[in-house]
Amino acid sequence: MGSAGWLDDTEQRAWRSLLTAYRRLLHCLDAELQACQDMSVSDYGVLVELSEAPGGRMRMCELAELAHLSPSGLTRRLDTLVQAGWVERARCPTDRRGAFAVLTAAGRARLERAAPDHVAQVRHHFVDRLSRQQLHLLAEALEMVATGCGEPPEAGAPERPEVPAQ
């Protein structure tokens, strides 16, 4: 990747605002979920991913990617969830090195107990602070960023028009 030059004030503000908002929001949600449910946001995220997987099971490598954890980070996270009885590890019958994480009935029940609090916290700290239009624009913009991550910009691609502030 070549040198694109320094970020201008608008670009710098957008970038730093994204990082600050992400860190503060995650910290706040984690602290509140810990306080009311004795569960971390990371544990909650792993349980959600498993609950949405067919049969409540997922290959460990896929789960690590979806949960934004390194393989060793997922292993540590699963150790806690297995000890709590919320997840089990299962060997892959077709790949001796492969393993699955499997959501237990207790894990599903625990997720269902925590979900209303987590949703209320997300609504309070994120959703309710933005208008429907802002939510739509933010989702669209972040989806565009997420899809383009790791892909070099197309040569000669037209610049996106600047969206006026609302």
Image (cartoon, rainbow, N blue to C red):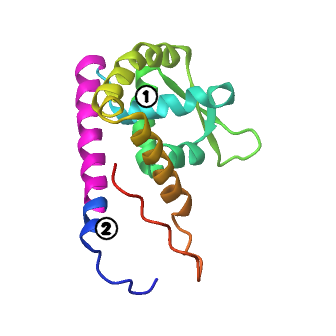
Position above or below: 18 against 42: below
Look at label 1 and name its amino acid.
Leu
- In this view, which residue lies farthest toward the right? 94
Circles 1 and 2 in contact, beta carbons < 8 Å? no
Dot 2, how many residues are within 10 Å of its Cα: few (below 14), some (14-19), or many (20+)?
few
Give the Cα separation between the discs numbered 1 and 2: 40 Å
Residue 19, how many percent across, how many down?
29, 54
Amino acid of disc 2? Glu
Secondary structure at numbered mark 2: helix
Q: Main secondary structure of the magenta part?
A: helix
Specify start and end residues of the magenta stretch as a single range: 15-37
Viewer-proximal residue among 152 and 136 = 136
> How far from the left and from the top, in percent, is residue 157?
58, 77
Q: Position of residue 121 (x, y in %)?
A: 31, 25
Q: Which residue is mark 2?
A: 11
* Residue located 29% across and 40% down the image: 26
Badge 1, how many Cα within 10 Å: few under 14, some, many 20+? many
Which residue is pictured at 53% across the width and 49% down the height? 65
Going from the N terminus, do you reach mark 1 or mark 2 first? 2
Name the residue carrying label 1: 81
Q: Secondary structure at mark 1?
A: helix
Res 122 quadrant in image: top left
Q: Is residue 111 left or right of residue 33?
A: right
User: Up-down: is 132 above or below 154?
Assistant: above
Q: Position of 32 compared to 108: left or right?
A: left
